[in-house]
């Protein structure tokens, strides 16, 4: 597989290493949006985009306009997601975005939604705590926001989330912590006066996200449409 990397920070470098170990070829590395034309010249089979919120939408739009399948792990820009999904359909392109490419985290999303649905009306309040490395730009994390949205979809008493502790139980609190050299930890707590249920996902190394991104790239490069990590996991589960 020929891969174009858009973004060459810690995640980009980790993806490059994992891709090469899997005998894939990184044919182009884009570090600035001004270099995007080089992507077309390199003719990758798929582009993997991990950059910054302010440039992600432009990078994805470029790929879709030039017929390059693209997966993105950049968070903090999803107000433009629907427009890019529409562009993908218009161009008969290929696009997948995920806030987290860890297989374990995506199973964690499903577990969280199941628990939120089962626990509604039983007197439990929900909260989320996320801890990441100090270089992470967005707060709360995209993963924490998705966990919150999963709870909100399944609990009519919750109207939204807040990035602070709150006595208002209609707002789901997300507490964000930034500590050096922490790949990522997410904890969802359901607490009543009598008991607490806590589910947790801990990433032990950044490589887990890179491995997931490369696996998704292998799966998606010959497909057309807008996909999610749920599509990937369901396909992998069926195949096994």
Image (cartoon, rainbow, N blue to C red):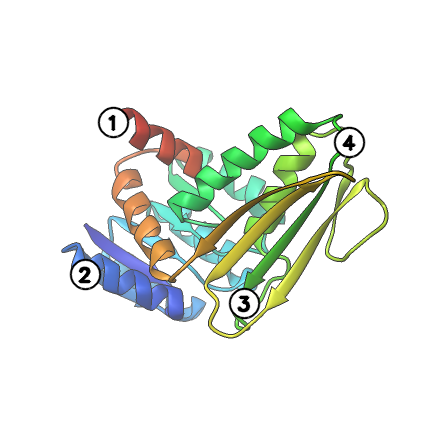
Left/right placement of residue 185 relative to residue 72 reads right
Give me the C-alpha separation between circle 4 and circle 1.
Answer: 40 Å
Horizontal and vertical percent position of residue 3: 25, 55
Using a 10 Å C-alpha cutoff, classify the residue at mark 4 as few (fewer than 14 neighbours), some (14 to 19) or many (20 or more): few
The answer to which of marks 1 and 3 sits earlier in the sequence is: 3
Which callout, 4 or 3, points to the residue nearer the camera? 4
Using a 10 Å C-alpha cutoff, classify the residue at mark 2 as few (fewer than 14 neighbours), some (14 to 19) or many (20 or more): few
Residue 122 occupies quadrant: top right
Residue sitting at the far left: 23
Residue 117 occupies quadrant: top right
Q: Nearer the viewer, residue 169 or 134?
A: 169
Height in image: 37 above or below 46? Answer: below
Q: Secondary structure at mark 1?
A: helix
Q: Secondary structure at mark 3?
A: loop
Residue found 82% across the figure and 42% down from its top: 169
The answer to which of marks 2 and 1 sits earlier in the sequence is: 2
CB atoms of marks 1 and 3 within 8 Å? no
The residue beneath circle 4 is 123
Residue found 76% across the figure and 58% down from its top: 164
From the image, which quarter does the C terminus lie in? Answer: top left
The answer to which of marks 4 and 3 sits earlier in the sequence is: 4
Horizontal and vertical percent position of residue 194: 75, 38
Horizontal and vertical percent position of residue 135: 52, 72
Give me the C-alpha separation between circle 2 and circle 1.
Answer: 25 Å
Height in image: 9 above or below 226? Answer: below
Residue found 38% across the figure and 38% down from its top: 93
Which callout, 4 or 2, points to the residue nearer the camera? 4
The residue beneath circle 2 is 20
CB atoms of marks 3 and 2 within 8 Å? no
Q: Nearer the viewer, residue 209 or 113?
A: 113
Residue 24 in view: yes
């Amino acid at each position: 597989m020929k891969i174009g990397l858009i973004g060459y920070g810690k995640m980009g470098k980790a993806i490059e290493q994992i891709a090469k170990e899997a005998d894939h070829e990184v044919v182009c590395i884009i570090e600035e949006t001004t270099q995007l034309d080089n992507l077309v010249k390199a003719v990758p089979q798929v582009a993997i985009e991990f950059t910054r919120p302010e440039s992600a939408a432009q990078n994805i739009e470029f790929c879709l306009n030039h017929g390059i399948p693209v997966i993105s792990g950049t968070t903090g820009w999803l107000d433009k997601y629907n427009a890019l999904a529409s562009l993908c359909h218009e161009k008969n392109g290929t696009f997948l975005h995920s806030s987290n490419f860890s297989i374990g985290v995506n199973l964690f999303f499903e577990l969280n939604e199941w628990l939120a649905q089962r626990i509604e009306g039983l007197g439990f309040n929900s909260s989320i705590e996320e801890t990441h490395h100090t270089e992470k730009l967005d707060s709360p994390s995209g993963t924490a926001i998705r966990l919150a949205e999963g709870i909100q979809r399944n609990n009519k008493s919750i109207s939204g989330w807040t990035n602070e502790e709150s006595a208002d139980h209609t707002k789901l609190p997300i507490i964000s912590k930034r500590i050096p050299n922490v790949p990522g930890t997410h904890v969802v707590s359901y607490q009543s006066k009598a008991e607490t249920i806590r589910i947790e996902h801990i990433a032990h190394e950044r490589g887990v996200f890179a491995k997931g991104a490369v696996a998704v790239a292998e799966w998606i490069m010959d497909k057309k449409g807008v996909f999610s990590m749920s599509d990937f996991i369901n396909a992998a589960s069926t195949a096994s």
